[in-house]
């Protein structure tokens, strides 16, 4: 695989970085050990500027090239997940109950590898802004970094990111122009009834039956209220109520997720869900409150920047190992906020036949770290050639 030769020399060092990060998984915005490790490496590489404390533990490192030019942004997410690890590897998580089950340890490592190479060679013009972001899995660290002004502060003109992909052949790339990943919303429904003896349901206002009715009715939003050519997923994922077989409880709780691409479809779902909850509550004689949380927006790749990124990916992995029209999926990604602020592209990098993302047996494939680092490095060199 034609990775950059100098980056290939870093392969074992990158593996050491990644496995250290794997042992210190931290959550959301609170990444003190992870951020300290990343900052220490960046200082060792000799970056020109290091701006820490963005979105609490995020940072932006600046590397200057040769001569004047624009600034290109490269992003890696750093946070982990609250999942107990079951990999059995010798570098297992040292933070019980947390693990890098999505490969952000690998994403961080790939960007560090690119940083080391770019700081050493500087075979580009303008600047590169290396964005190390917390809280992708939780509250949207990308949104916070954008709101704190990183695009304007560092004059970033375009921005790119990678995500590992279990099931995609090792070193293969996949992306698509336009809509790539869905917007994600979360709904919570709190039902207040009147409990009583299970043998005397006529004396109660049963929240269990109301919850069942609402859950079933919510599914008709997909089957009866939207155009079949518009992608939409509405999933009820939790129903909690009751404690024992002979007691009808006072309350019930429903939780779920909504995935959309079209804002008009999203608005329709919100409207219908309010109508269904209110109508079903009246039907069953209970009170119900809908809490609808609008989450990450859809991830939209810029067509021109994606075509360029695909050409760079082909240079790294070969013409036949890049899928430029891979279609869209219903997963979500907070890099969407950065793509709303600046044109750019998000690509998947295959890591082979491994456990899936967010699985307790998942582990990042260290073999692809030099591939991802080479992609980032060549992206900068081709986007902003030095002219030397």
Image (spheres, grey):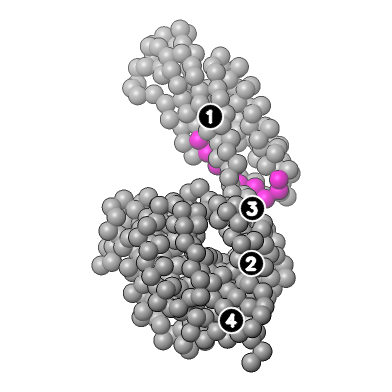
Q: Which structural element holds mark 1?
A: strand
Report the residue marked by disc 1.
189
**Closer to the camera: disc 2 or disc 1?**
2
Q: How many marks?
A: 4
Q: Position of residue 275 (x, y in %)?
A: 66, 26
Q: Identify the mark nearer the N-term, 2 or 1.
A: 2
In terms of image quadrants, where is residue 162? Answer: bottom right
Marks 1 and 3 close (CB-CB < 8 Å)? no
Q: Identify the mark nearer the N-term, 2 or 4.
A: 4
> Who is closer to the viewer here, 293 or 320?
293
| Residue 281 horizontal side relative to residue 353, left or right | right
Report the residue marked by disc 2.
156
Using the numbered discs, state the Cα–Cα distance from disc 4 to disc 3 in whole angstroms.
Answer: 33 Å
Q: Identify the mark nearer the N-term, 1 or 3.
A: 1
| Residue 166 horizontal side relative to residue 40, left or right | right
Q: Position of residue 182 (x, y in %)?
A: 62, 52
Using the numbered discs, state the Cα–Cα distance from disc 2 to disc 1 in whole angstroms.
Answer: 41 Å
Is 175 located above or below residue 123 in the figure? above
Q: Is residue 223 something that shows in the picture?
A: no
Magenta stretch, residue numbers: 255-263
Report the residue marked by disc 4.
65
Q: Which structural element holds mark 3?
A: loop
Q: Position of residue 166 (x, y in %)?
A: 47, 65
Is 136 located above or below residue 233 in the figure? below
Report the residue marked by disc 3.
298
Q: Identify the mark nearer the N-term, 2 or 3.
A: 2
> Who is closer to the viewer here, 180 or 116?
116
């Amino acid at each position: 695989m034609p990775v950059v030769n100098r980056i290939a020399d870093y392969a074992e060092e990158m593996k050491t970085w990644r496995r250290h990060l794997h042992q210190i998984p931290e959550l959301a915005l609170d990444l003190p050990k992870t951020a300290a490790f990343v900052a220490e490496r960046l200082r060792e590489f000799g970056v020109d500027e290091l701006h820490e404390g963005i979105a609490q533990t995020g940072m932006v490192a600046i590397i200057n090239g040769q001569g004047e030019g624009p600034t290109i942004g490269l992003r890696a997410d750093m946070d982990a997940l609250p999942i107990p690890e079951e990999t059995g590897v010798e570098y297992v998580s040292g933070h019980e109950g947390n693990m890098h089950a999505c490969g952000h340890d690998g994403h961080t490592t790939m960007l560090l590898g690119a940083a080391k190479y770019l700081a050493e060679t500087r075979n580009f013009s303008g600047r590169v802004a290396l964005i190390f972001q917390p809280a992708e899995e939780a509250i949207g660290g990308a949104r916070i970094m954008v709101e704190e002004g990183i695009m304007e502060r560092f004059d970033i003109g375009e921005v790119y990111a990678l995500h590992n992909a279990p099931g995609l052949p090792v070193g293969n790339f996949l992306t698509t122009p336009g809509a790539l990943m869905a917007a994600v919303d979360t709904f919570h429904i709190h039902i207040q009834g009147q409990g009583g003896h299970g043998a005397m349901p006529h004396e109660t206002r049963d929240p269990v039956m109301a919850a069942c009715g609402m859950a079933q009715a919510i599914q008709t939003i997909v089957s009866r209220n939207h155009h079949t050519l518009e992608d939409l997923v509405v999933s009820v994922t939790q129903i909690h109520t009751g404690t024992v077989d002979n007691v009808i409880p006072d309350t019930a709780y429903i939780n779920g997720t909504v995935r959309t691409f079209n804002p008009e479809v999203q608005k329709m779902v919100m409207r219908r869900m309010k109508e269904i909850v209110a109508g079903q509550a009246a039907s069953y004689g209970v009170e119900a409150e809908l809490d609808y949380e609008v989450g990450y927006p859809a991830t939209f790749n810029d067509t021109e920047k994606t075509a360029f990124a695909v050409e760079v990916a082909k240079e790294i992995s070969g013409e036949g190992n890049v899928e430029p029209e891979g279609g869209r999926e219903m997963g979500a990604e907070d890099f969407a906020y950065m793509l709303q602020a600046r044109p750019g592209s998000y690509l998947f990098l295959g890591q082979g036949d491994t456990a899936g993302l967010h699985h307790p047996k998942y582990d990042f494939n260290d073999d692809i770290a030099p591939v991802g680092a080479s992609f980032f490095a060549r992206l900068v060199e081709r986007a902003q050639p030095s002219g030397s």
